[in-house]
Amino acid sequence: MRIHIVAVGRMKNGPEKLLLSDYSGRFDKLARSFGLGPLTITEVEAKRKKGKSAEAELIRAALPPSSYVMVLDERGKNITSTDFAHTLRHLSSEGTQTLTLVIGGADGLDPSLVNSADASLSFGKMVWPHMLVRVMLCEQLYRSASILAGTPYHRE
């Protein structure tokens, strides 16, 4: 199952970009052995002055066809890392070809995009910088692959 991230805004050089590259690379190496990946990231232009609906149109245009879409939203389902790993395994075993994870811009996602998604995931009630959410999501993808592979990275 291919994993695709669509995110609003352009990641600039800096520590977040280094961490993103590190965790996405780790995921690709580990997850390939059991049919997950590759991980790709598509950045769409932030349209703060035009609103969330303008960003939603760019996100929709970037979604791979027939993809299972999971948005990251503060009102989404709050699950454990182990549950996320099991969700990835379940989607893959059910024949999902592509999972697309969507990260909105600084103002969040347009409600129409959230309502049309197959699932909604939350990283808790706190608000996180959207560039840092990319890093956190890639770390959770790597952690999920580690859980599924039985490595000691994730400790319960």
Image (cartoon, grey):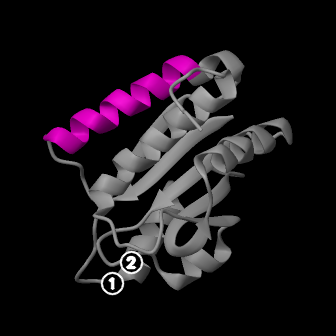
Question: How many numbered circles does the render carry?
Answer: 2
Query: In terms of secondary structure, where does tag 2 sit?
Result: helix
* Nearer to the camera, 102 or 141: 141
Left or right of 66, for residue 127: left
Q: Tell me where the magenta segment starts and ends, as one range.
A: 14-30
Location of residue 113 (image quadrant)? bottom right
Left or right of 85, for residue 127: left
Left or right of 66, for residue 48: left
- Kind of residue at disc 1: Gly
Note whether 42 is above or below 24 in the view shown: below
Residue at 47 percent across and 80 percent down: it is: 110
Quarter of the image containing the N terminus?
top right
- Coordinates of residue 131 in the picture (x, y in percent): 28, 55
- Kind of residue at disc 2: Ala
Residue at 55 percent across and 19 percent down: it is: 30
Residue 96 seen by the camera: no
Residue at 53 percent across and 84 percent down: it is: 111
Write down the residue under mark 2.
54
Write down the residue under mark 1.
51
Note whether 17 is above or below 61 in the view shown: above
- Coordinates of residue 60 in the picture (x, y in percent): 53, 65
Q: Are marks 2 and 1 in contact (CB under 8 Å)?
A: yes
Specify whether residue 26 is painted magenta. yes
